[in-house]
Image (tube, rainbow, N blue to C red):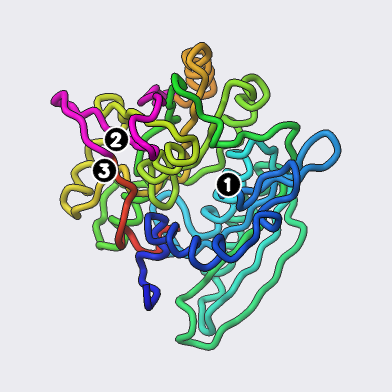
Amino acid sequence: MSKISLAHGSGGIETSQLLTRLILNRLPEWMKSLRGGLGLDFPDDSAAIPIGEGYIVTTIDAYTVSPIFFPGGDLGKLAAAGTINDILMLGGRPVAVLDAIVIEEGTNIDDLSRIVDSMISVLREEKICLVGGDIKVMPRGQLDSILITTAGIGVASRIIVDKNIRPGDKIIISGYIGEHGAAILAAQQGIKSDEFKSDVSPLTKLMLPLIEGYAGDIHAARDPTRGGVAMALNDWARGSQTMIVLYESELPIREPVVNLCEMMGVDPLNIASEGTTLLAVSPDKAEEVLCRMHELGYREARIIGEARERASSVGLVVLKTLIGGARILEPPSGELVPRIC
């Protein structure tokens, strides 16, 4: 690792290695989280700070997508929805957002206005305050268009910590896999088709009822963005020291997405979904949670696997194939879809 490559920003193995080398290995344990909270001691998309009888849930993320307008959304919608979803995945109720926008000199002001309007529209619909931010302009050629960084703030009475997955837990996905990644990939390749549309959207209407009704039964939650389902499940297996078994026959992947990924040499399990969540749910409540998800409008939600006792010294994800075989589902590596989120 002598120089940074695009693979270091893909959300896969290289990203994990870079974070470990640059940050995690340089911090003493006491700096990684506040006592009783959650931080870099167990990295997730959000952190939790204990306060009173509950938690402040925080998140920060930089959004850079190419193209900045894509079927189903744009950079502004992506930034707002992604921030909201990261708070939800830790069991928090989002209440406020801050943003920092860095703009390349010469950017079309109408494009910038459209993106900002899109971000504000999502926050308005979700009744989330925009309480602060910053704007910077970079000289032409020193930045590609627009970069948005957002920080989110939420509150929680209890948090969902992914390392709490237990053998027997059922793995549920709320909808189709790889929709955002396929839309971006098609747009980058100049493929114009109504078949590809990003699923980018806030998951508030799904997650808040589930958090309220099943908080103790949901042992893990993750939106499979960079690195896709494969990276999310490998993180879970490693963090909880379990083996996760995935059933290929149950995976909700639309045929056009499968065909595009085959054509481009990409595994749909490795590319991003931006309006989908993975849940690990106690086995005695899994069917009830699934029915509730259907009632909330997530008709494609289904059980796609389960956690088991690990079969080795490290957590593994095993994919049971359509033909009855099995293979290890490795975490993604390399440049999958650059500038995806």
Span colored in magenta: 299-328
What is the quadrant of the N terminus in the image? bottom left
On screen, 276 above or below 146? above
Q: Are marks 3 and 2 in contact (CB under 8 Å)?
A: yes
Q: Residue at x 43, y 49 (%)?
A: 72
Q: Nearer the viewer, residue 247 or 240?
A: 240
On screen, 332 above or below 209? below
Q: Are marks 2 and 1 in contact (CB under 8 Å)?
A: no
Q: Residue 141 at what x, y percent from top left? A: 45, 86
The kind of residue on which mark 1 rests is Phe
Question: Which residue is under mark 1?
Answer: 42
On screen, 266 above or below 289? below
Residue that lies at the very extreme toward the front in this rendered image: 313
Question: Which residue is under mark 3?
Answer: 257
The kind of residue on which mark 3 rests is Val
Q: Residue 128 at what x, y percent from top left? A: 71, 46
**Residue 57, image quadrant:** top right
Label of residue 253 in the image: 2
Indicate left or right for 338 with 28 as reference.
left
